[in-house]
């Protein structure tokens, strides 16, 4: 698995591991974000437009949530930031690890 170049929000700090419905939503959202990025990248959509679409997905979910529920807006902000990180990770190619690179880009001379 490649190492993320984008530092995402700490979901553990705002999403309780005991809130199973929210954890299921986050897992499904992550899979959906990755699938959306791959599909829209194939169509030639820019990363900025994909990020706007993903933020809209999170916003619609936050608006559909019951106001009396325990889920806070802070949790949805953290989820939105994480979703942007998942977009960037899925959109950009993996970064080569230079310590194990057999063919360095610099010439020895």
Image (cartoon, rainbow, N blue to C red):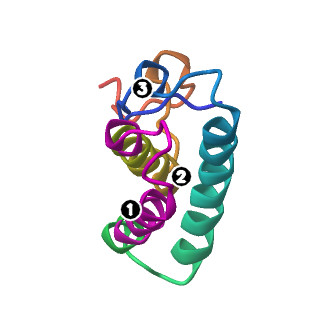
Residue contact at pointers 3 and 2, CB within 8 angstroms: no
> Percent from the top left, x then y, of residue 103?
52, 31
- Using residue 82 as the reference point, say whether residue 101 is left or right of it: right
Q: Is residue 92 above or below residue 5?
A: below
Q: CA distance from mark 1 to mark 2?
A: 15 Å
Residue at (48%, 15%) from the top-left corner? 99
Question: Is 32 part of what is drawn in magenta?
Answer: no
Q: Residue furthest bottom?
A: 43
- Using residue 34 as the reference point, say whether residue 80 is left or right of it: left
Q: Secondary structure at mark 2?
A: helix
Q: Residues within 10 Å of mark 2 (few under 14, many from 20)?
A: some
- Tag shown at residue 55: 1
Q: Quadrant of residue 26?
A: top right
Say which of marks 3 and 1 sits in front: 3
Q: CA distance from mark 3 to mark 1?
A: 18 Å
Q: Residues within 10 Å of mark 1 (few under 14, many from 20)?
A: some
Report the quarter where the C terminus lies: top left
Q: Residue furthest front?
A: 68
Instruction: First in sequence, mark 3 or 1: give its number.
Output: 3
Front position in the image: 96 or 77: 77
Q: Tell me where the magenta segment starts and ends, as one range.
A: 52-76
Q: Is residue 48 above or below residue 5?
A: below
Front position in the image: 81 or 90: 81
- Tag shown at residue 90: 2
Q: Is residue 72 above or below residue 30?
A: above
Residue at (44%, 43%) from the top-left corner? 79
Mark 3 — residue? 14
Q: Secondary structure at mark 3?
A: helix
Front position in the image: 91 or 61: 61
Secondary structure mostly seen in the magenta stretch: helix
Instruction: First in sequence, mark 1 or 2: give its number.
Output: 1
Say which of marks 3 and 2 sits in front: 3
């Amino acid at each position: 698995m490649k190492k993320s170049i984008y530092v995402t929000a700490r979901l553990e700090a705002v999403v309780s591991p005991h809130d199973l419905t929210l954890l299921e939503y986050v897992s499904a959202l992550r899979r959906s974000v990755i699938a959306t990025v791959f599909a829209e990248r194939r169509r030639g959509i820019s990363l900025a437009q994909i990020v706007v679409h993903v933020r809209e997905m999170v916003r619609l979910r936050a608006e559909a949530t019951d106001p009396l529920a325990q889920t806070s807006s802070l949790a949805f902000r953290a989820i939105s930031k994480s979703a942007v990180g998942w977009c960037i990770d899925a959109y950009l190619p993996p970064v080569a690890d230079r310590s194990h690179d057999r063919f360095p880009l610099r010439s020895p001379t």
